[in-house]
Amino acid sequence: MPSKNEPQQSPSDESAESSQHKPASLLDALTPIIALVAMLTTAVYLFSSDSSSGANQIALIMAACIALVVGAKNGYSWKEMEAGIVHSVSMATGALLILFSVGSLIGTWILAGTVPTMIFYGMKVLNPEYFYAASCLLCAVVALSIGSSWTVAGTLGIALIGIAGAMGLSVEITAGAIISGAYFGDKMSPMSDTTNLAPAVVGTDLFSHIRHMVWTTTPSIIIALIGFVILGFSTQSAGGSSDLESTLNILQSQYQPGVHLLLPLLVVLVLAYKKVPAFPTVILGTFAGAICAALFQFDNIIEFVGDDNLLPAVALVKGIWIAMFDGYTANTGDTVLDSLLSRGGMSSMVNTVWLILCAMAFGGVMERTGLLKRILQSILGVVTSSSSLIITTLASCIGANLITGDQFIAILLPGRMLKVEYTKRGLAPVNLSRALEDSATITSPLVPWNTCGAYMASTLGVATIAYLPYAFFNLVCPLISASYAYFNFKIEKLEDVSEAEEVIA
C-alpha cells in the first residue's frame, strides 16, 4: 500500500510502465542462475562447510546485482526492482523474528537446565543402536501432533543433538534423523502451514490432499527408518559406559535435572498444539525458561555472570539477559559437554539472518523482473505427457527453492503457473498439491540459503551440507513421487470434465 506522502499510480500509469518492459529471453533468465551456481560452487570449494558464514551471502548479492542489470536492460526501473526486493524480504520477516526468538529460547533453556535435563533423561532411555531411528520417530510423532518442523527442531532437536554428542554418536546423522522425522510430521499434519497452503493454491481440500500424500510419504519414512536402523547398528558409539556415567554425574551435579525443568518444553508444545503462532509461542517458551532459570538455577547464574560486585538479584537479571541476547557459556569441566551447552542467544542467529536476507533479495529481483517466470515457462515447454508434467513440477519446485530461498514462494509460484495445465490434461488438483509438497516443502531444509535450511543449520548447530546426506526422508520422497509419475501409479484423474472444459475455454 502506498504511503500518504507518495503519489498513487493510476491504472493507466501502471499500464504504461508495464508496456516499457521487454520480455525476458531464456538467456536473460539463465544468466544470473549460471553466475550464482558458479559462485556458490567456488564458495564451497574455497570455504567448505564455512561457506554459509559469508561467502554464500556475497555470491547471492552478486547474482542479485547481475539480475538487476538484466532487469534494467529489459526496461525495469530501480524503483520497481527495489519494490520486488522489499516485498520478498518482507515475506521472510516472520521467519527472521522466529530465528531471533529461537536463539533466546536456546540460551534460556540451557541456563534453566531444560536442555541438560532432556539430555540427562535421553541418555538414560535411548539405546545407541536405535538412537537415530528413535530420534526420527519421536520427531515425526511430535511434528504430526503440532504441525511445526521448526518447533520440533528448536526443542527436541536441540536435546537430541546434545544426547548424540554426549554418547559419542554422529551429530550429522542425528540432524538428518531429526529433519526427516520433523518434515514427515509437518507434511502430514493438518495443522501445518505448508500442508494447508498447497491445497489452497491448487483448489482442493485439505484432507484429500493429506490422503493423497500418504502414498509417497509412507514408503519414504519407512525407507528412512530402515536406513537409520542400519546406521545405528553399523556405527560404534565413541563413548564407553564409564564416559556416559561420568557425563550423567556431571549433569546431575551441575543442573540437578528433574521433571520440573521440562515445564518450558511443555509450554511450547501446548501452545503449538493450540495453534498459537510460532513467534509468540517461542517467546513465551523463552520467558518460561527464564522463570525456571531464576527459580532453580540461581547458583549457576551467579557463576555464569562471574561478577562478585553485583547484588545477587541484579546478577540474576543480568545472567538471564545475557543468555537471551548472547547465549549461555557452560563451565562443567567436561570439554564435550561445554561445547554442547555453550550455545544460543539472538546474536548466534545474525549470520543466518544475513544469509536469508541475501537469498530473499536475489529471489525478489528474479521474480519481479519476470526472470523466474521465464524459466518456468521454458520448463513447461518440454512437457509432453501427464507423467512429464508431474516430474517437471517436482524439478520446478526444487529449482524455485534454490533460486528464491523460500519454501512458500516455491509452492506458490509453480502452483499458480501449473494449475491450469493440470486441469487441461484432466489431472485432479491433488496431484499438483502432492507434487508441490513432495518437492518444495521436503527439499527446503536441504538448501543452505533457504530459510528452512538456514534455520535448521543454526538451530541444530550442524551445517546443511553436513546433514544433507542423512536427511533420508527428504532425499527419498521426491524420488518416489517422480517414480509414481513415471509409472503412472496413484495419479488421480479429474472427475468433473466440465471443470477442465471451463479452464481450457
Image (cartoon, rainbow, N blue to C red):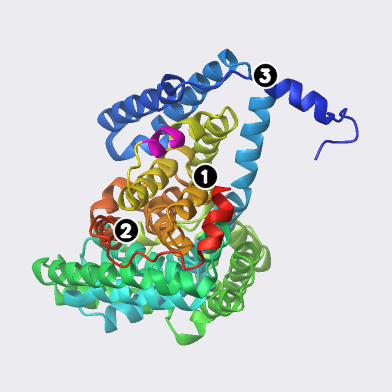
Mark 1: amino acid: Met
On the image, numbered disc 3 is attached to which residue?
77
Q: Is residue 292 magenta?
A: no
Residue at point 59%, 18% (across, down): 22
Bin the neighbour count of mark 1 within 10 Å (Cα to Cα): few under 14, some 14-19, many 20 and up: some
Residue 376, by quadrant, is top left
Q: Is residue 16 above or below residue 108?
A: above
Q: From the viewer's perspective, is the residue at label 1 or at label 3 nearer? A: 1
Tag 3's secondary structure?
loop
Q: Nearer the viewer, residue 328 or 286?
A: 286
User: Which numbered marker is on residue 474?
Assistant: 2
How many labels were placed on the picture?
A: 3
User: Which numbered marker is on residue 417?
Assistant: 1
Quarter of the figure that contains the N terminus: top right
Range shown magenta: 376-381
Q: Nearer the viewer, residue 152 or 331?
A: 152
Q: Is residue 372 visible?
A: yes
* Pointer 3 or 2: first along the chain: 3
Indicate left or right for 126 with 377 as reference: left
* Pointer 1 or 3: first along the chain: 3
Residue 211, by quadrant, is bottom left
Residue 16 rendering spot, x and y as whole percentages: 75, 21
Indicate left or right for 59 with 93 as reference: left
* Pointer 2 or 1: first along the chain: 1
Q: Nearer the viewer, residue 9 or 103?
A: 9
- Disc 2 from disc 1: Cα separation: 24 Å
